[in-house]
Amino acid sequence: MTIADNSQRKTRGKVPIGLRLKAWWDGYDLEVRQRLAAQEPAAAHEVRYERDPLAWETPRIELAQQLWGKGFNAPGEAEQTLDLVKPVGLDESMSVLEVGSGLGGSARLIAQEFGSWVTALEPDPGLAQAATALSEMAGLAKKAAVSSCDIENLEVKRAGYDCILSRTALYGVDNKLGALAAMAGGLKAKGQLIMTDFVKSDSAGRAFERWRNLEELKSDPWRAEDYEETIKELGLDLRVAADVTDDYRAALVKGWSGFMSGVSKQQIDAEQAQIVKEEAELWNLRKAALDAGELRLYRFHALSTRADRLLSDW
């Protein structure tokens, strides 16, 4: 046996999980072949420190941040937040309520950019716990406070906020009317309501049903017209009802494509791989419903009818 032969070994023919995930995402199966691979010597005096994850640092939350950015858990959230609130003219004297705040990234961004005081409500206890920890780590525990809420029985301080922001928080909620009424009542005299939410198309069919069943929604999303009519009936001046699906879809594809392009190089275990597959299936079905036109994302912007100044065009 030569020295060269002695420095090589055969692989066991097992494909790393990361490569299998990448292949699954690309839609093909890997064929395992035996080959000779050079054995890499262990690094001398290598010291690694790995701390135990905190209670809120679950694999799903870590995946969300890998997909959408640190502190965020939705496509395009970091990029779109400032554009959404730009017409409001926020400053340090103003208060903001965010309903469905996720990991609190938008709340912290608003607090940092405008100095406004943000109260964030999140119905998922796990996300609320993580968001609270992230706000504390950023030194914004009071300026961007996050707490859990009962979205089906939403309670909002009456006439307490200059701006209320809600992002894809109501589409699966059964008591949408109650939540919208609570938000409308929470606006100050010159307050503004900004919402994005999934809406159901009149042509909703198989793609919509597959996504709905996987997500196990309590209630179907409303149509865009349902939101428009309800917002007006609650006494608000609806200024914008716009389809923003294309931007959302582009951000969704960008996030997942970027993640999957590097997943084969990551150290990933079986539990993490399963979570990635489950989340990817959900987002793929959502994308399919969007592509079919059976599910859309809309932006709504409304003013309190007691406001005495108007928005400039945006």
Image (spheres, grey):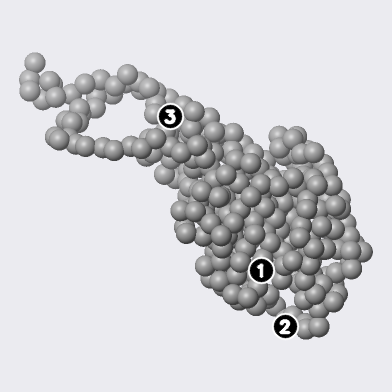
C-alpha separation, residue under disc 2 versus residue under disc 3: 52 Å
**Closest to the observer, 198 or 134:** 134
Residue in the picture at 89% in, 64% down: 234
Residue in the picture at 7% in, 23% down: 3
Tell whether 177 sits left or right of 68. Answer: right
Which comes sooner in the sequence, label 2 or label 3? 3
Which amino acid type is marked by label 3?
Asp
Please give the label number shown on residue 225: none
Q: Secondary structure at mark 3?
A: loop
Q: Please, is residue 270 above or below residue 276 in the view? A: above
* Tag in front: 1 or 3: 1
C-alpha separation, residue under disc 1 versus residue under disc 3: 43 Å
Q: Secondary structure at mark 1?
A: strand
Residue of label 2: 312
Quadrant of the rendered image containing residue 119: bottom right
**Closest to the observer, 187 or 173:** 187
Residue of label 1: 95
Q: Does residue 210 show up?
A: no
Residue of label 3: 269
Which amino acid type is marked by label 1?
Ser
